[in-house]
Structures are given as C-alpha cells and as structure tokens.
Image (spheres, rainbow, N blue to C red):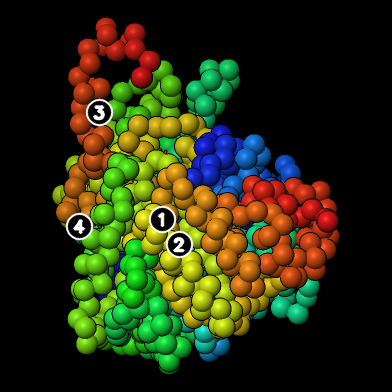
Amino acid sequence: MSETWIILGATSSMARVFIRELAGRGDALLLAGRNMDDLKSLAQDCRLRGAAQAEAVGFDARKPGGFAALLKTAQEAPGVLNAAVFVGSMPDQAEIDADPSLVDGTVTDSFTGPARFLQMLAPELETRGKGTIVGVGSVAGDRGRLANYVYGAAKAGLATYLSGLRNRLGRSGVHVMTVKPGPVDTAMTWGLGPQPFMTTPEAVARDILKGIRKKRNVLYTAGIYRIVMLVIRLIPEPVFKKLSI
Amino acid sequence: MRWNTAEYAGWGRALRAEGELARPERRSVLGAALAEGLTPAIGNRRSYGDACLNSGGRAVDMSRLDRFLGFDPETGMLTVEAGLSLGEIVAVMAPRGWLPAAMPGTGFATVGGSVAHDVHGKNHHGAGTFGQHVSALTLINGQGEQRVTQDSELFRATMGGLGQTGVITSAELKLARCKGDIVTVTERRAEGLDEHLALLDGSEATYSVGWIDATAKGTAMGRGILEEAETGAGLVPPMKRSKTVPMDAPGFALSSPVVRLFNAAYYRRVPARGRSMVKPLGEFFFPLDRIHDWNRLYGKRGFHQFQCVVPLAEAEALREMLRRISDAGLASPLAVLKRMGSGRAGFMSFPMEGYTLAVDFPARPGAADLIRGLEDITAEAGGRIYLAKDSLGSPNRVRAMYPELDAWREAVQMADPGGALATDLVRRLRLRDKV
Ligand SMILES: Cc1cc2nc3c(=O)[nH]c(=O)nc-3n(C[C@H](O)[C@H](O)[C@H](O)COP(=O)(O)OP(=O)(O)OC[C@H]3O[C@@H](n4cnc5c(N)ncnc54)[C@H](O)[C@@H]3O)c2cc1C
Ligand SMILES: NC(=O)c1ccc[n+]([C@@H]2O[C@H](COP(=O)([O-])OP(=O)(O)OC[C@H]3O[C@@H](n4cnc5c(N)ncnc54)[C@H](OP(=O)(O)O)[C@@H]3O)[C@@H](O)[C@H]2O)c1
C-alpha cells in the first residue's frame, strides 16, 4: 500500500529530487507551496514518473490563514501519512543588516511558519500512530556565524522545535528526523561562489531516504559535516567571536 | 536572476570558456533570465569541443529544467522540458516499454542538446537521427516564444542547428516501443578492417556498433569487436552503483604502451568464436556513464575527439586514417566504427550514408596535426566531421562539408538577427558569416 507524503516547499531544488524518488516508488503526493503554476507542472511530472497521485496545494509560510485547508486535505489521505519540510529562505545577511524587518520573514519561512503547520498536523499523526516527519534545517543553525546568523537562528529554532516534536511524537510511533545539509548545489547557493564540501540534491535525497529507513534522528548531509560542525561547535566562544568562517 | 561567473568546458576539456551562467530551475525563472537578453542555452556539456561554450558572454544552463510534461501511452508521444536527460527518459519509460527512438552513447545528453546536434545512436542505420522523431518543439528566440512543427524551415534549421535558432524549452518526442529494459548483445571479433566493414555491412541487428583497436597495425589494422543488440524482457542484476574519477589522471595513464596493452586485452576478452549475453539497457547504451567524470582520465590538458563520416565507397580513406592514427601512437581505447544510414533531420545534421569513425586523442603534442590530417582525408573523401565533437576544424573546409549551410544561415538570421545565440564553435568556424 502506497504512503502519502505532504511536502512543504515542494518547489525547492532539493525537494524536487526527493519527491521524484517517492513518485518512482508509487507514493501519493501532496505538493504544497506558494506558486501554483510551478506546483502543477511538478505534480504532472510526478504522475508521469509513477506517483499514485500528485496534487498541488497552497502553502505560504507567511499566511497561516491557509493552513487549516491544507490540514484538511492531508487528513483525507488514507493509510500512512508523512510530512517533509523544505521551506526556507536565506536573504543576504547584508540586506537584513540594512533592513531589520527582514528578520521576521526569514524566521517565518524557515521556522515558525512550518512549525505552526506541523503543530497542527501532530495530533493527526498521533492518532494514526505511525508516519514520518522530515524537517530540513541547516548546519547554519549549529552556530551563529557572521555570514548568515539570522537565517542560522531560524534554523536553530527549527532544530530545537523538531527535537521536542521528536520527543513528543516518538511516544506514539511517529518518527521525526532533522536533516542538516551543508552546502547543496541548488537555486539557493547558485552564484554564491565555491562552497566547501558542496553536495548535490541527488545525494541529499538518497541520504534522506536512507535516514528514514534507518530511523535516524539527526542527519548531516554531506556526512562530513557531522565532523566539521562538531569541530566548529567546540571552538570556544572567545575565539569564535573573532573568526569569520 | 543570479548569474554565476565560472570557467567551464565541454566534455573534452581542451577548450575552455569563462562567462556568466544562469541555471533556472523553473520555466518562469528561465523567462526572467532571457528577458535580460537572449543568450545561448547549454545542456549537460557532453559535446566535446566548444559547441556549448560562450566565452566572455552569458549562457543558460538548462539541466534543471527537466520535467516530464505529458505522455500518451497509446501513441508513445512524450512531451518533456528540454533539460531532461535521455538517461532519465530511459529509466522512467523503458520499464513501461518505451525508449527514445535514437540515443547517443551517453545518457547525460539532454533533449535540447540532442536536438541541437541531431544526435544519432547505434540504430542510426534503421531509425535515423533523434530529430527525425521530434514532432514539435517550443523555442524562445528574437521573435519571442513559439511552437515549431516538423514541416517548417525553422524546424529544419533547429534540428542539428547548434542552438542558433533559439532556446529550446520543450520538445514532443515520438518514443519507440521496446520489449523491456534489457538487451541481448552478441559480440564478434573482426580481425582487420575489411572484415570489420563486412560485418557491419552484413549486420541485420537493430543496434550495431564496432569497437575498434586504433593502435593495431599491419594486417590487424582496423580490428575490433562488433556488438549487435536487440531489446528484450527479462531479469538481470541491476547496474552497479556509479563511480567517480576523483582527480585528473597523470599523463602516462593513457600513454601509448598502456593503451596498446589495454586494447589487446580488451580485444581478446571476446572469444574467437564470439559470444552472446544479456545486459541492463544502460550498460549497453551508455557504457561509460557509470564512471562519472571519466574525462579526467585524460589529465588536465583534456582531449579531443575526432569523428567523421565518409561515403560507403570510401573505405580506403578509413584505411589511410587508421594507418596515420596507429603510426602516431596517440589513440586512446575509445574508438568506434559504425555504419550509418542516410537519415538526418536538419540542414546542419551530421549523418550521411557511409561509415563513421570516432577516436579520442589526449591533447598532447602532435594530436592537433594528426586531427587536421584526418580532416583533410575526410574532406577529400567527400565526408564530413561532426560538430558535436570538433574543436580544431578549419572554417572553410568544415563549411564546405555542410552543403545546406546557406539555408540554415538564412533561417538563423531571421530567428536571431542580433547574433545573440552565437557560441564559440559558431564563431571559430564562422558558420553564421556570409561569404
Ligand atoms: C560518452 C559520449 C558518447 C557520445 N556518443 C554520441 C553518439 O553516439 N552519437 C551522437 O550523435 N553524439 C554522441 N555524443 C555527443 C552528445 O550526444 C552531444 O554532444 C549532445 O549534444 C550532448 O548534449 P548536451 O545536453 O550535453 O548538450 P551540450 O553539450 O551542453 O550542448 C550542445 C549543443 O546543444 C545546444 N543546446 C543544448 N541545450 C539546448 C537548448 N535547450 N536549446 C537550444 N540549444 C541547446 C548548445 O547550445 C550546444 O550548441 C557523445 C558524447 C559523449 C560524452
Ligand atoms: N542549498 C543549500 O546549500 C542548503 C543548505 C542547508 C539547508 N538548506 C535548506 O534546504 C531547504 C531547501 O532549499 P533549496 O536549497 O532547495 O533552495 P530553494 O530551491 O530556494 O528552496 C526554498 C524553498 O522554500 C520555499 N519558500 C520560501 N519561502 C516560502 C514561504 N513563505 N512559503 C512557502 N514556501 C516558501 C520556496 O518556494 P517558492 O518556490 O515559492 O519560492 C522554495 O520551494 C531550505 O529550507 C534551505 O534553507 C539549503
């Protein structure tokens, strides 16, 4: 019996590759995002690749008024219901420095918007007693850095939220996996110059699927970032505050 | 639109370009990038030379515009975005009994790139080129966006048209039926050129291609292995996980003694009486794709591929080419001989009825002179060199090999009067200049 996945931020470069894998194995897909044209062509792509069903549904992290309708659609899905969150935005730190009001949107896109929806979805999953939630955070959330600390703060918030949600939902058989990608070759990083240990959306999708199978709690991808971030977290704050890495 | 300033190269890596690249992931973003000014499109850069380069200018990388848009299981009509790779089409459609009607030797070629060089496959003698199975496509050029269908001049100028008539955004492909996702392959030794050509001439298989030992001399010159194949249904182990060549190989990796030894062993691998076996589709059609970045085996100077086609009556020209190649001691193990049919879809398409020979040469001293000599022989034999592979051709001679160049140029001039779509190859060979 195929499972249903609700994907928040389905248009993201990273999500698209992950979704294709799900489509290829015949899952049903609720593709949520804010651009209906993009979502519709994505849904068609998924159907042709073998998805049992693929539907475009509206989700704007900044417009929580629409969440209830999305939740209702999700509730109608039979069988195992899963969710994955790819939503996020990373404005240039310099732009945020110039216009502090951008903090709100950044935090809403990467943290509070998706968290609020997951919060609404949680009881449904608890009732079903199974399913998986995948939340895409970032290594940027592991330590606040000069280059992107507002985005990093939002991702740190999401990671802490997911940790708590894991604690809660684990009790009713629902698994929550936090994914922390290092740099990935997507629209978000295009044109930002060379990045260390950059990986591909294909490799990330493979890692996520494997992580789901193995019920991993926190997944770094590329894997080397588990070590890189361990080192970065160990740097004492008095030293760290003088670095620009 | 964010533009990435990058150095990039074609598959051969001997020619490079620096310029700005955009890589839209959706149709709307492509529109926005082109609204800043029309630029050439590039695919997965599996052309060897400078067809996919625009030095000092901009280009749009289409590889993320790779969605399936529609499929009719009754007729086999498949509509896709132009950045979709043929390998992906095979992976999704072959289990349902459909294949692209023509496929080059790499599954990484995109639909756009396959149109722009009107590529051919191991079934060219029967099925013709990729473009002969395209029924319509969408183009963005100086005149905006339009759907182009088979019967127009613009269509003929676009097939094999080197991207000069516009950015291809989507294409409607007539897929061919296949029985399943495996192939039965028969391999036979050919002891020399005459036998090799005779086997190719006599082959009745749907797919046929000859691997050629381009280091062999004397009576063994032209020896190789003829592979013939048919698709089928059955169960074979899946393809092994792909491997990556992590860095540029040192220069001696493909030195002439190494290649001679390798080729001799590769030849003897097939027993003298031949053999048949069953393989997954990908292993037969895209044998090198499992080794990612294999072009790095040639070291950082890169390599050139020479590919020509000569008319059937010009077997002697092939003999002369092989003699020069084996004397020069520069060939790599990658060398292919195939009989082509007459199928071609556009003014600038490569194929003609005859034999096509393709050989890789590391970019070492002597390679350029050797290739120019091979180009001479091709021209004298009334043949043609393949622009998807070319990096050294001389303008006048190449132009003379393409008799419909004028018709192509006229259509291109209408589609892109400002010359915004010109690439390094088009400039090097002065293909759009009026003479
Ligand atoms: C291992 C290997 C084996 C090969 N075997 C064969 C073979 O058997 N037969 C054969 O015919 N070829 C063969 N080729 C060559 C290859 O099929 C062609 O070069 C093909 O064009 C590569 O496609 P691409 O998407 O990488 O295009 P690129 O190399 O990126 O671009 C090639 C040309 O296509 C144009 N182009 C690409 N996309 C678009 C678009 N969307 N709109 C407009 N123009 C576009 C570019 O401007 C450029 O002129 C082989 C190549 C390799 C590496
Ligand atoms: N690329 C990296 O190096 C990297 C590294 C670590 C973590 N990440 C995270 O990975 C996730 C996927 O990113 P990506 O790299 O694939 O980049 P991307 O293609 O830019 O994806 C970002 C996605 O977020 C969506 N989004 C943004 N704001 C939204 C809002 N208000 N409401 C609904 N959707 C919104 C976008 O939707 P639209 O299509 O509507 O714009 C898009 O689908 C993000 O959470 C990102 O932070 C990326």
Q: Element under label 4?
A: helix
Distance from disc 4 to disc 2, alpha carbons, whole Å, reads: 57 Å
Distance from disc 3 to disc 4, alpha carbons, whole Å, reads: 24 Å
Q: How many discs mark residues in the rendered view?
A: 4
Q: Nearer the viewer, mark 4 or mark 2?
A: 2
- Choose between B259 and A97: the one closer to the eye: B259
What type is the residue that disc 2 sits on?
Arg
Residue at 19% x, 47% y: name it: A216
Q: Which residue is mark 3?
A: A229
Any atom of ligand 1 within 8 Å of the CB at mark 1?
Answer: no
Residue at 25% x, 46% y: name it: A177
Q: Which mark is residue B324?
A: 2
Q: Are marks 2 and 3 on the same chain?
A: no
Q: Is residue B135 left or right of residue A23?
A: right
What type is the residue that disc 1 sits on?
Ala
- The single residue placed furthest to the front in the displayed view is B218
Any atom of ligand 2 within 8 Å of the CB at mark 3?
Answer: no
Q: Which residue is mark 4?
A: A213
Q: Which residue is mark 1?
A: B328
Chain of the residue under label 1: B
Q: Nearer the viewer, mark 2 or mark 3?
A: 2
